[in-house]
Image (spheres, rainbow, N blue to C red):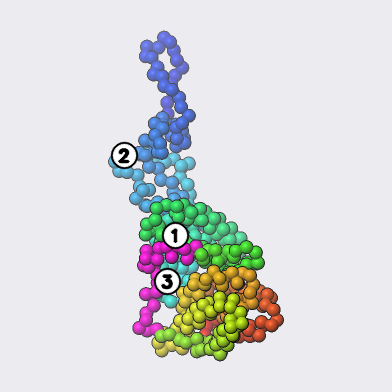
Amino acid sequence: MIETTHDPPHDKNHGLSRRTHRKSRAGCIECKRRRIKCDEVKPSCGNCTESTIAQLSFDSAISTPAAHLIPSTASTPPIPSAAGVEIPNLFHLELWHHWLTTACLTFSDDDNRVGMWRETVPQLAVRHSYVAQLLLALSALHLARLQTVRRALCMATSTALQSSAIDGMIDGLAASPDSDRTSSLFIAATLLCFCNLAKGPQDGQYLLYADTAEPEWLGLLQGVKSILAEHRHVLADLSDEDGRAGDVEESVGPDLALSGFSASFDKLKTSIESLRAEDESFARYSRPVDDLQKCFDSAFWRQQGSDVIRVHSPAVFGWLYRLNAEYLKALQDGKPMALVIYAYYMVLFARLDRFWFVEGWVDHIMVDIQRRLHHTYKHWMEWPCLLAQPAESQSAGG
């Protein structure tokens, strides 16, 4: 403990003259609190550098290497007073634990693909606070579904963490790029997309289009796309594609997974080509439809010897990723054929409804598409309306 002394009143008859000094108000807060003289060196004075007082808040713990929290053995710093130690945010610790033990397991139905969520993401979170904040935000959204009595707390915490993380991401984008920072920004952008989905359907928001302005989720997806496009070579190691055990899995055609697929989809493609012959503007739908067919063709698989058909979720999200600006504008403008194609995609998206973060979105979007479509286009909706049901209600569910 440091003793503090006070100079006695000046006595002109005292044998020893008092050493004078100029008082300053520029000393650091920590030295003022400890009532010791500060050398006023910036950014950290000598006293603070020597004492290396660790702030034990959760936010700093997850963004600062552990070695930096240990005082140097070359000095004997004073023991911090109780007032100088902050209690960790216990709810954040609970959310961290919930992620590692429960939430991280809900992003894939294949154990081979869980590793990224259980290991890679937390490792990046330890090094980058904005990844940690988004991990906690998504964990809070999952916990809100399990503990409805704490839903308000979980939702408010998630919103605050997302807002803070976005500020950190902006700083990260402005910094000099390196492989670790690029990976962290890509994961953070992906987590933001999941957070937006996991909030559930929002009035006026339909993922790829909105009642007014730009759809929130599409804007977040564009952020993921821009990072991946610029740093694809760096991010290759993050892919979990190699986690699929190809020697024990087999592809399943969409006709086996979805009743009436070929007949309905071929009819859609033929009609678009016929309409294109009369109106060249329909050419903007050719690529989205071709990509959607490829998506259906590659989406379904099963373990050899099993009758359970599953969906490869990256293939499903792949169609959303590859959409061009021309189709997205037609969808935002409410063009009927753009809406019909989106409804066909909802059949595939519905196969992901077993994942908690997409629950409710299919019904929300399908209702709005039908509301917008003119009655002359309603016959196109028969197959999508029949098949766009939760996966567990279909024989293809897994």
State the CA–CA distance, disc 2 to disc 3.
Answer: 45 Å
Q: Is residue 134 magenta?
A: no
Tag 3 secondary structure: loop
- List x then y, in percent, for residue 169: 47, 55
299 left or right of 369? left
Q: Nearer the viewer, residue 3 or 114?
A: 114
2 or 3: tag closer to the N-terminus: 2
Q: Residue furthest left?
A: 74
Q: Which residue is mark 3?
A: 114
**Contact (Cβ within 8 Å) of mark 3 with mark 1:** no
Is residue 213 at least partly visible in the picture? yes
Which residue: 49% across, 57% down?
133
State the CA–CA distance, disc 2 to disc 1.
Answer: 38 Å
Residue 185, numbered circle: 1
Amino acid at circle 1: Leu
Q: Nearer the viewer, residue 96 or 380?
A: 380
